[in-house]
Image (spheres, rainbow, N blue to C red):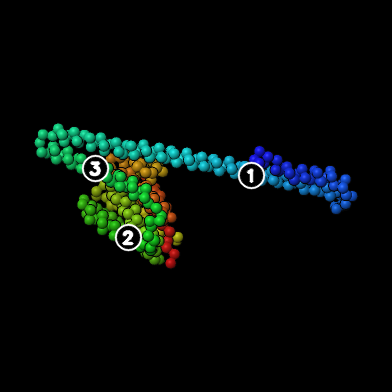
């Protein structure tokens, strides 16, 4: 059937031509319009118009099909390229701690005094914790699904206050300065509908990230406001900033920018935050200027709860 599909647009033209030829033989032509076209001629022209119309539809369908195939092929290519990048980064993230683990085991075997053994054992423990954290974060990221969300109204300023308490109780961060600015005019930001625990985890990750990149005596600033249809949370740090060519990639799994390689982390924190925000139908963006105060600002936009 498919091999004859190309003949379909010419069917009306063929029927019109047959009508133009055969009808005068079978019946007396009738005058139906003022310039004396016979019924067969009318049917012929109708068939001609129908042919052009069907041919145009067929061409449009063909173009749409080609565009769809191109889009599918591009999506497959992007997925495969992303998968390859992820594997390369995972190989890098696993190879370094495993090499460190091997070196520590060799030092432990060669140690002749108690201090050397304790140092090697401490290094081994630190590497194992890093690997455990990496695998745990990978599992959490892969398991995140919208069906896991518990939907309830979440008061963002209240949630941030709880997060600040947790951060302040963390050893080494008791004296860190975190400024919280919440717009109160004309009213406080309304609640958002979402999973309180997951939203709290995402905001904690952003705050933790900001503290890592901000020197000890500088403050991190968190701002909350409403823009009508969304609640906007901004986390600003005083770090060195993110290079422009890296800004679109920092949300990729295991990606670590030039300024982040000396900072402890798995490279999954921002990907985790982005996934949580996406599950809440929100948006995560950043703006950054290198070598300036408050070099990077991460912005989370979440839909306002309709009460």
Residue indicated by mark 3: 128
12 and 66: which one is in front?
12
Give the mark nearer the N terminus: 2 vs 1.
Answer: 1
Considering only vertical position in the picture, is 289 above or below 306?
Answer: above
Residue found at the very far front of the displayed protein:
1
Residue lying furthest left in this view? 113
**Where residue 111 appears, x then y in whole percent?**
13, 34
* Quadrant assignment for the N terminus: top right
Distance (Cα) linking label 2 and label 1: 53 Å
Seen at 34% across and 49% down, the residue is 140
Mark 3 is surrounded, within 10 Å at the Cα level, by few (under 14), some (14 to 19) or many (20 or more) other residues, namely some
Q: Which circle, 1 or 3, is nearer the viewer?
A: 3
Element marked by disc 2 = helix
Considering depth in this image, is 225 or 120 the residue closer to the camera? 120
Residue at 41 percent across and 43 percent down: it is 248
User: Cβ–Cβ below 8 Å for labels 2 and 1?
Assistant: no
Quarter of the picture containing the C terminus is: bottom left
Q: How many marks?
A: 3
Regarding residue 275, the answer to whether it shows in the image is: yes
Q: Which residue is mark 1?
A: 60
**Would residue 213 be seen by someone viewing this image from the given angle?**
no
Which of the marked residues, 2 or 3, is nearer the chain's N terminus?
3
Does residue 75 appear to the left or right of 48 in the view shown? left
Instruction: Give me the disc on residue 159.
Output: 2
Mark 3: secondary structure: helix
**Label 1 to label 3, Cα distance in Å?**
59 Å
């Amino acid at each position: 059937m498919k091999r004859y599909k190309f003949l379909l647009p010419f069917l009306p033209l063929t029927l019109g031509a047959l009508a133009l030829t055969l009808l005068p033989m079978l019946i007396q032509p009738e005058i139906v319009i003022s310039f004396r076209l016979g019924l067969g001629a009318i049917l012929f022209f109708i068939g001609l118009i129908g042919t052009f119309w069907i041919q145009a539809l067929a061409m449009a369908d063909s173009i749409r099909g080609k565009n769809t195939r191109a889009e599918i092929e591009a999506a497959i290519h992007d997925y495969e390229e992303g998968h390859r990048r992820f594997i390369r980064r995972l190989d890098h993230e696993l190879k370094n701690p495993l090499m460190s683990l091997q070196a520590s085991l060799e030092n432990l075997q060669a140690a002749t005094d108690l201090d050397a053994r304790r140092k090697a054992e401490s290094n081994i423990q630190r590497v194992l914790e890093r690997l455990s954290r990496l695998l745990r974060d990978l599992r959490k990221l892969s398991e995140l699904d919208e069906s896991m969300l518990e939907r309830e109204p979440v008061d963002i300023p209240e949630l941030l206050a709880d997060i600040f308490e947790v951060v302040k109780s963390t050893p080494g961060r008791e004296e860190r300065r975190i400024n919280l600015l919440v717009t109160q005019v004309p009213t406080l930001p309304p609640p958002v509908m979402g999973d309180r625990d997951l939203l709290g985890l995402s905001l904690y990750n952003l705050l933790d990230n900001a503290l890592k990149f901000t020197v000890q005596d500088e403050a991190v600033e968190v701002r909350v406001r409403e823009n009508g249809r969304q609640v906007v949370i901004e986390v600003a740090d005083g770090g060195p900033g993110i290079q422009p060519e890296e800004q679109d990639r920092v949300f990729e799994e295991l990606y670590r920018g030039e300024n982040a390689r000396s900072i402890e982390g798995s490279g999954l924190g921002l990907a985790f935050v982005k996934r949580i925000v996406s599950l809440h139908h929100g948006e995560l963006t950043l703006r950054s200027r290198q070598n300036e105060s408050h070099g990077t600002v991460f912005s989370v936009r979440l839909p306002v709860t309709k009460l």
